[in-house]
Amino acid sequence: MADNGPVLEMTREEFEELVAEALDRIPPELTRLMDNVAVFVEDEPPSDDPELLGLYEGTPLTDRGEWYAGVLPDRITVYRNPTLRMCESREDVVAETEITVVHEIAHHFGIDDARLHALGYG
């Protein structure tokens, strides 16, 4: 086992399924409001932030104005290996994946990190 590799073993496909299940648990009232956003799974985050679990890139709904048209979708990326490195069991991975997905979707809705931490989605 590599020193920096995940302790838990989970295939990319299994992890993608957990992300999909977390997305399925988002209330329909919220998913109907999500607009122009795509969700991806990557193995590793950018090298300058190796413990990053998720990343939202785009323009939050709260910042979109009349100018917002014809732009590429917002991008939510969930990183598999840092999640596996920090978790001790499959149940931990399921819980952490759900927290990460909710956290990044909240950014899409314009909720900042301080508010997310206050709500328990740090």
Image (tube, rainbow, N blue to C red):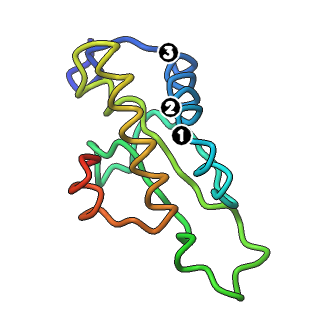
Q: Secondary structure at mark 1?
A: loop
For the point 53% across and 51% down, which residue is it?
Answer: 76
Disc 2 from disc 1: Cα separation: 7 Å
Disc 1 from disc 3: Cα separation: 23 Å
Please tell me which of labels 1 and 3 falls first in the chain: 3
Q: Quadrant of the N terminus?
A: top left
For the point 50% across and 31% down, which residue is it?
Answer: 22
Say the numbered circle drawn on residue 26: 1
Residue type (three-letter) at the residue carrying disc 2: Ala
In the image, residue 64 lies at what x, y percent? 61, 79
- Left or right: 44, with 118 as reference point: right
Say the numbered circle drawn on residue 11: 3
Which mark lies nearer to you, 1 or 3? 1
**Mark 2 near mark 1, Cβ–Cβ under 8 Å?**
yes
Q: Measured along the vertical axis of the image, is residue 96 above or below residue 75?
A: above
In the image, residue 26 lies at what x, y percent? 53, 40
Q: Measured along the vertical axis of the image, is residue 107 above or below residue 18?
A: below
- Left or right: 33, with 94 as reference point: right
Residue type (three-letter) at the residue carrying disc 1: Ile
In the image, residue 27 lies at what x, y percent? 56, 41
In the image, residue 58 lies at what x, y percent? 55, 67
Q: Measured along the vertical axis of the image, is residue 87 above or below residue 52?
A: above
